[in-house]
Image (cartoon, grey):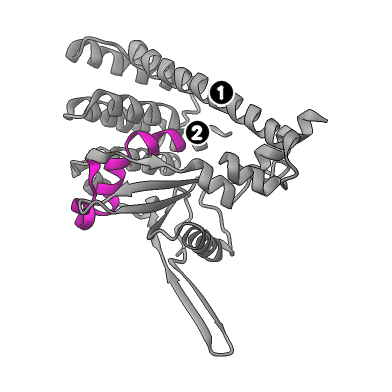
Amino acid sequence: MRRDDSLWKGLLEDVFDDFLTFFFKEKAKIFDFDRGFEFLNNELAQLFPIDENAEHPVFVDKLVKVFTTEGKEEWVLVHVEVQGYNDKDFAQRMFTYFYRILDKYNKRVTCIAIFTGSQKKLVPDYYSYEFLGTENHFKYNVYKIIDQNRDELNNSDNPFALVILTVLNALHKGELGEEELLLLQTGIAKSLFQKNIPKPKIQAIFVFLRYYVHFDNPENISKFDKEINLFLKKNTTMGIEELLIERFEKKLLEKVKQEIVEEKDTTFVKSLLTSTDFDLQKIANIASVPYSFVEKVKASMQ
């Protein structure tokens, strides 16, 4: 997995409440944040199994279960185009995501596509279909980072604005020059630590802004770390090294836990393969794992 993909995947899970309040400002009060969120990775993988032989896609998808203040269970589909490449079938793909989720799970779904690329041309926010009197018009949310206003992001109280600002800086890297980019990224980092944000979120956003921007000159990475380290030592009880180590240790623990879960899934799937005549899709459904996972386990047994 490419670095940017991995950064987006982790970030969305760590600050999803800020994500919702950033993109749905007027509707944010309908969400019950105290009940948390459930990331439905297995459900999404079952609907859209990854072709192991295909080139890795340049987008990141999240299907998330949320709760409203009325106690209702709703789902949010988040689609992030990591490179924002020109895809003539994008609108239809968004519609396919929507109707498969709606058809299989019968849950109300809202969809948002976030484009992180440098292309300024318009991207579709709807999919239309018409044939012999049958018509369909599907509209979804679109957010293009390249079109956003830097001042508005700087003035936002939402921590997720710093994420958007980081991506915007990266997109304008060629125009800004590395020295100005360094100043802007340092400013974002300092702003992050000055805000009243829970420590886990600070760590998540800092890891994103620290690794998302790619400096051509390695010295600028050292300058950034040195500047932020001095700031942290002056204003907190930890430095950048402690911050990053703690963050990555947590991720390592999560990875170990995931490996344990996968080991149990493998054992269960092997049992179903040897003791039943179920087809692979049925086994995948029973075990709540992707179809490709069952294929992989079966291949390992041969």
Determine whether, in the image, residue 238 is placed left or right of residue 262.
left
Q: Which residue is mark 2?
A: 6
Question: What count of labels does the image hold?
Answer: 2
In the picture of the structure, the residue carrying the numbered disc 1 is 259
Q: Where, quadrant-wise, is the N terminus in this rendering?
A: top right
Q: Nearer the viewer, residue 76 or 82?
A: 76
Q: Is residue 17 magenta?
A: yes
Label 2 and label 1: CA atoms lie apart by 17 Å
Q: Residue at x 38, y 40 (%)?
A: 38
Density class for disc 1 (Cα within 10 Å; few <14, some 14-19, many ≥20) is few
The type of residue carrying mark 2 is: Ser
User: Residue 246 at what x, y percent from top left?
Assistant: 37, 14
Relative depth, front residue between 250 and 227: 250
**In which image quadrant can residue 302 be found?**
top right
Q: The residue under label 1 is which amino acid type? A: Glu
Where is residue 144? Give x, y as percent: 39, 54
Q: Secondary structure at mark 2?
A: helix
Is residue 118 rendered to the left or right of residue 193? Answer: right
Residue found 44% across the figure and 28% down from its top? 211
Q: Quadrant of residue 7?
A: top left
Q: Name the dominant secondary structure of the magenta segment.
A: helix
Which residue range is magenta in the image? 9-33
- Mark before the other along the chain sequence, 2 or 1: 2
| Residue 59 visible in this rendered orientation of the protein | no
The residue sitting at 52% across, 48% down in the picture is 44
Is 24 included in the stretch rendered in magenta? yes
Front-lying residue, 59 or 211: 59
**Residue at the spot 27% in from the left edge and 41% down from the top edge:** 18
Residue 232 visible in the displayed image: yes
The residue nearer to you, when weighing 129 against 177, is 129
Circle 2 crowding by C-alpha within 10 Å: few under 14, some 14–19, many from 20 = few
